[in-house]
Amino acid sequence: MEGNCAYCFKYRPLMKSHAIPRAAFKAMLAGKGNAIGIPYGDGNAHLTSDSGDAPLLCDLCEQQFNRDFDGPLTNALKSLENEILVNGFRGSITFDSDQLAHSIVSIAWRICQSPAHMYSEVNLSGIHRAELDRLMRLPSKRILQDCTVRIGRLSDGRPVGSGGFDQKLMNQFIKAPEAHSIRLKPHRKAKHFAMDWTMFGFLIHLVVPRLPYAKRKEFGGLKSKTTRIRAMPVDIFKYRPVVDALVAGYAAKEDGRLSPSLKKRETRKSKG
């Protein structure tokens, strides 16, 4: 389809753009190409191959985003994942933190611009959308002056032998993006907004404007002008939004709220 590109505003043929890079869905959609979609509310759990693509950017802008943001970010997170699999959570990589932060901001910006159903839970106010758009268009070296970015590695504190999830499986878990306002002090106006999502087994947090304590070591946020990147472990059973998603999935199964195709799949598994 044709339309105005969300980034350059020119009227051109639009590409089916991904906000979260398609490569992040590769492990989840391996095999027969279907993942299990967790319902909101009382909906049915279902099989899905949705990767959040939708008409958004023109070809030139799509190429720019892939070259400047998605390609480097994908390579960085895959490298960091490999380091963690080998060396545990002390594993780290060398990468420009400002470029990494800008790449993550570019994903958040596309999430807010995209009409894809996967991003329907992200509804920023006009003021916050304008702030994110302004941030997106800044030079990379200025990004972390105006926002906070934190990368955590999904983990399961339970031993694998006792039913815990192995680290190699974490990249198969995709939590759809969500956004909410942040009030730093009680009875004060909520001036900050936050977004979070998962990709490649990592939990991504973006907060705009920058949090005043974002440089504290225990917080684990990215620091400008540094090149050592680590990911703090985040227990999936201690992070409320992830727990809510898991509970919704288990509840749908227990209630029999499964789509016909998923019921057939579960039947085949039980017979096998």
Image (cartoon, rainbow, N blue to C red):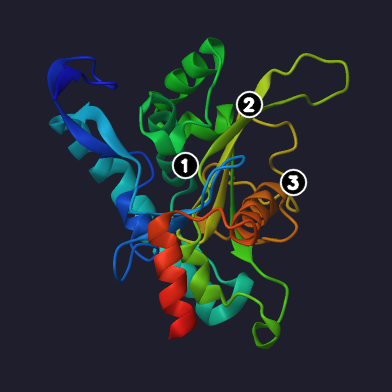
Q: Determine whether the residue tagged by mark 1 lies in a helix, strand or loop.
A: helix
Q: Position of residue 125 (x, y in %)?
A: 56, 15
Q: Can residue 104 be seen in this view?
A: yes
Left or right: 207, with 269 as reference point: right
Marks 3 and 1: in contact by CB < 8 Å? no
Residue 23 location, quadrant: bottom left
Mark 3: give few (<14), some (14-19) or many (20+) Cα within 10 Å: few
The Cα–Cα distance between marks 1 and 3, rounded to whole angstroms, is 17 Å
- Kind of residue indicated by mark 3: Arg
Q: Position of residue 60 (x, y in %)?
A: 15, 31
| Nearer-N-terminus badge (2/3) | 2
* Nearest to the observer: residue 167 or residue 260: 260
- Kind of residue indicated by mark 1: Asp
- List the residue tagged with mark 3: 216
- List the residue tagged with mark 2: 193
Instruction: Examine the rendered structure and indicate whether residue 271 appears above or below residue 73.
Output: below
| Nearer-N-terminus badge (2/1) | 1
Mark 2: give few (<14), some (14-19) or many (20+) Cα within 10 Å: some
Q: Determine whether the residue tagged by mark 2 lies in a helix, strand or loop.
A: strand
Residue 99 location, quadrant: top left
Left or right: 9, with 225 as reference point: left
Question: What residue do we see at 47% from left, 64% from top?
Answer: 171
* Nearest to the observer: residue 98 or residue 264: 264
Q: Where is residue 223 in the image (x, y as percent from the top left)?
A: 59, 45
- Give the position of the N terminus as an image quadrant: top left
Question: What residue do we see at 77% from left, 14% from top?
Answer: 189
Marks 3 and 2: in contact by CB < 8 Å? no
Mark 2 vs mark 1: give the one in front.
2
Instruction: Examine the rendered structure and indicate whether residue 123 appears above or below residue 100.
Output: above
| Nearer-N-terminus badge (1/3) | 1
